[in-house]
Image (cartoon, rainbow, N blue to C red):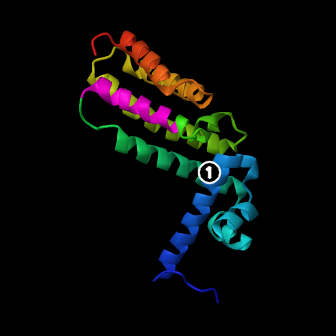
Amino acid sequence: MPRIEAPTLAEHQALRRSALVQAAAQILAVDGPHAITPAAVAAMAGLARSSTYQYFPSTAALIRAGVEEFFRAAMERIETEVPAEGAPMDRIEAYIASTLDSAVSGHTAMMRLSSLDLPKECHDRVRELHDQFGDIVGAALVDCGALDPEVLTPLVTGLVQAGARQVAEGVPAEDVRRVIMRLIRGACPGC
């Protein structure tokens, strides 16, 4: 019988599942979804390949778990860096700065997810999770009285994604942030 590495079986299983999810997210970030296999994920997590199937029935499920972890970590970072209260433009600027900082520090894999060859269920989930980032921007746009915030929100998040790609390619983050904020202020003259 395998050795239990936690006080309870449930905690042991949660630790193993978490190790597999972290490994899937790391492989996704570094090598892309084509590199995610049960064997590769298990090896990175320090587990037997057969352990993977106890928690994830397919490679697509592993990829989805990696994608979910990506977004969870990104949302946690943004929630820490973007104030829930305060001036709406300050919140939008903090969101932009956080996103661009991620591009500078090499966390660009999330931005590439929509263009990767992911299973359809993963693309759908990426869209759902991405909408959570839009909620942060949308709330700030509503708070500042922007006209048509439901139209403006996806435009702003798309602009920020495009800016993050530029930063990842070497354009100075401060230059990109300044231009994005100028465009947003132009679209929200009352803010």
| Magenta segment boundaries in residue numbering | 87-102
Q: In this view of the protein, which residue sits in the foreground, 6 or 10?
A: 6
Question: On screen, 185 above or below 54?
Answer: above
Q: Quadrant location of residue 136?
A: top left
- Residue 21 drawn in magenta: no
Q: Quadrant location of residue 13?
A: bottom right
Residue 58, position in %: x, y?
71, 59
Q: In this view of the protein, which residue sits in the foreground, 3 or 58?
A: 3
Question: On screen, 157 above or below 46?
Answer: above
- Furthest residue toward bottom: 1
Side of 185 relative to 102 (left or right): left
Q: Quadrant location of residue 80?
A: top left
Q: In this view of the protein, which residue sits in the foreground, 40 or 30?
A: 30
- Residue 96 drawn in magenta: yes
Q: Amino acid at mark 1?
A: Arg
Q: Quadrant of the C terminus?
A: top left
Identify the residue under disc 1: 64
Residue 118, position in %: x, y?
70, 43
Residue at the image position 61 percent from the left and 63 percent from the top: 20
Side of 130 relative to 114 (left or right): left
Side of 84 relative to 79 (left or right): left
Question: What kind of secondary structure does the magenta stretch mostly adopt?
Answer: helix
Residue at the image position 63 percent from the left and 40 percent from the top: 123
Q: In this view of the protein, which residue sits in the foreground, 91 or 102?
A: 102
Side of 11 relative to 32 (left or right): left
Q: Quadrant of the N terminus?
A: bottom right
